[in-house]
């Protein structure tokens, strides 16, 4: 076979990609017709594609490249570790210094008494671990029936059978026989889209109290845990009203259920603190982390659990683990990533400088005639496209049509911005400068203008009935 390199013509690469490479969350025929954009290189917050375009990565890859691209220290940490010990497992009474150091460092960084770390390779695997872990936790205490996990509609917790069941994505549940048994979903705290005429605080409390209703209906003796993202990411950067999390926390404490904070997106500085749980004052029993743990340079995730959970689980063999749990090379890369985040004060700078700046600049977009709301927390932000912002109206066209048009214009303007239905989201690398935030806003505004023009000319500005 000929060697495939970035020097090949884009069309050749696209044809080979379409012929052999199955992409996640993608219709293969559509992709073949359009051709994939081929990314060849990246530095800081900027991508280069095979046609030489310089693209501002408003999504930090897939919400993960927190320290930005191109840090040689991570490559060196990986090479060093590969030479010394490229692999060894952590089963059968063995360990190694990268896994030991990383677990100890995570225990230091994680809030409260979250002091024990179970490693995996993806957010999905870590959430599958959590599912088995919380059920085993109650079984160990003579309560095997406490097995139901409550989650939320429009949550994203991953793509494996367990994690996709925990998630509340209707399109995912429609394929492959999901959700698995004993997973229950309540409503999300999405006031803009679902709050109608309610006051935002009242709506947030109502949605939090759906947890209490579910507990009453299903029975506290049946419920193991509640899982939620501090801020829903893939669901559209839905930032809950400040009344939401304290109420959830109250309900979890009042009933005997564990609280799992899925920090896969929120962790490692995204919200302006090390963890979203700190930004929203959540006291979880378990945190799921991934993505920013290695800034995406290598795949790694973890469940970080409390002293209590670890003690209960610890009296027995937890029959669970992955070949790559605590992989020495990924652990070494994670440690180097955490060192950079800490020593270069990247998290602090997001909290005190760039998040407030992005908040101010992003809020200006709410003035745009097509924008129903523009919100942000830390360095994640979203806006709702609306044909009639005075009443937060949805489009008459199928959900996501306007969002897709907007994403295409963003592509053409060399800014990566994702669409979730008709919400547009960004989650850039945490090293973004103020000047780069200005560039981002400028490109998003141009994208919105062009989208607006196209929606008018395609006759797509009709609003759905109230
Ligand atoms: N939990 C959360 C909160 C996530 O955002 C996962 C778990 C699963 O992680 P893995 O590593 O198994 O992918 C995620 C992943 C998107 C998008 O398009 C978001 C994710 C993954 C892929 C696409 O917004 N989040």
Image (cartoon, grey):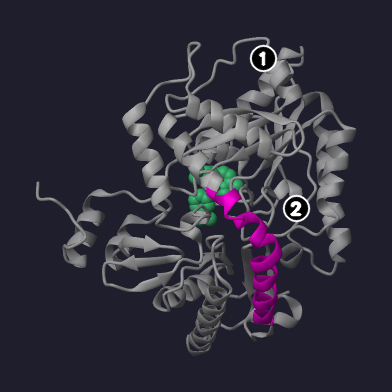
- Magenta part of the protein: which range? 340-366
Q: Which residue is mark 2?
A: 279
Q: Residue at x 58, y 83 (%)?
A: 461
Q: Residue at x 46, y 68 (%)?
A: 416
Q: Residue at x 82, y 23 (%)?
A: 221
Extreme residue toward the left, this view? 1
Seen from the viewer's position, the closer of residues 123 and 109 is 109
Report crowding for label 2: few under 14, some 14 to 19, many 20 or more residues within 10 A (C-alpha).
some
User: For numbered disc 2, what is the local secondary structure?
Assistant: helix
What is the x, y in percent for residue 347? 63, 55
Seen from the viewer's position, the closer of residues 262 and 215 is 262
User: For numbered disc 1, what is the local secondary structure?
Assistant: loop
Q: Which residue is mark 1?
A: 314
12 with respect to 458 (left or right): left
Query: Residue 215: within the magenta?
Result: no
| Quarter of image, res 354 | bottom right
């Amino acid at each position: 076979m000929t060697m495939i390199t970035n020097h090949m013509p884009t069309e050749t690469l696209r044809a080979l990609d379409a012929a052999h490479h199955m992409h996640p969350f993608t219709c293969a025929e559509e992709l073949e017709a359009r051709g994939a954009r081929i990314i060849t290189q990246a530095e800081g917050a900027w991508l280069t594609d095979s046609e030489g375009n310089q693209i501002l990565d408003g999504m930090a890859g897939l919400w993960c490249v927190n320290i930005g691209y191109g840090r040689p220290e991570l490559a060196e940490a990986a090479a060093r570790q590969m030479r010394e010990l490229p692999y060894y497992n952590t089963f059968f009474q063995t360990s190694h210094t990268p896994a030991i150091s990383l677990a100890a460092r995570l225990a230091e960084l994680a809030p409260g008494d979250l002091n024990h770390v179970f490693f995996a390779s993806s957010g999905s695997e870590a959430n599958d671990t959590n599912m088995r872990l919380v059920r085993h936790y109650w079984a160990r205490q003579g309560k095997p029936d406490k097995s139901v996990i409550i989650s939320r509609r429009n949550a994203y917790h991953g793509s494996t059978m367990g994690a996709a069941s925990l998630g509340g994505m209707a399109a995912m549940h429609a394929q492959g026989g999901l959700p698995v048994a004993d997973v229950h979903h309540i409503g999300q705290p999405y006031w803009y889209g679902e709050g109608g005429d309610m006051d935002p605080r009242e709506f947030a409390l109502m949605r939090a109290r759906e947890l209490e209703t579910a507990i009453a209906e299903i029975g506290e003796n049946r419920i193991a845990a509640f899982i939620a993202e501090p801020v829903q990411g893939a669901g559209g950067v839905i930032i809950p009203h400040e009344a939401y999390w304290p109420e959830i926390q109250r309900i979890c404490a009042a009933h005997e259920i564990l609280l799992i904070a899925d920090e896969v997106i929120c962790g490692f500085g995204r919200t302006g603190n090390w963890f979203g749980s700190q930004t929203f004052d959540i006291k979880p029993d378990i945190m799921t982390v991934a993505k920013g743990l290695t800034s995406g340079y290598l795949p790694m995730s973890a469940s970080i659990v409390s002293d209590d959970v670890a003690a209960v689980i610890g009296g027995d063999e937890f029959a669970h683990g992955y070949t790559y749990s605590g992989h020495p090379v990924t652990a070494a890369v994670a440690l180097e990533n955490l060192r950079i985040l800490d020593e270069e004060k990247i998290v602090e700078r997001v909290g005190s400088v760039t998040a407030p700046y992005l908040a101010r600049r992003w809020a200006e977009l709410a003035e745009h005639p097509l924008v129903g709301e523009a919100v942000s927390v830390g360095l994640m932000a979203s806006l709702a496209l609306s044909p009639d912002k005075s009443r937060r109206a949805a489009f008459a066209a199928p959900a996501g049509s306007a969002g897709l048009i907007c994403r295409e214009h963003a592509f053409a303007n060399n800014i990566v911005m994702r669409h979730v239905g008709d919400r547009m989201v960004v989650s850039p690398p945490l090293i973004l400068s103020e000047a780069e935030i200005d560039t981002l806003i400028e490109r998003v505004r141009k994208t919105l203008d062009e989208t607006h023009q196209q929606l008018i000319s395609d006759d797509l500005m009709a609003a759905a009935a109230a």
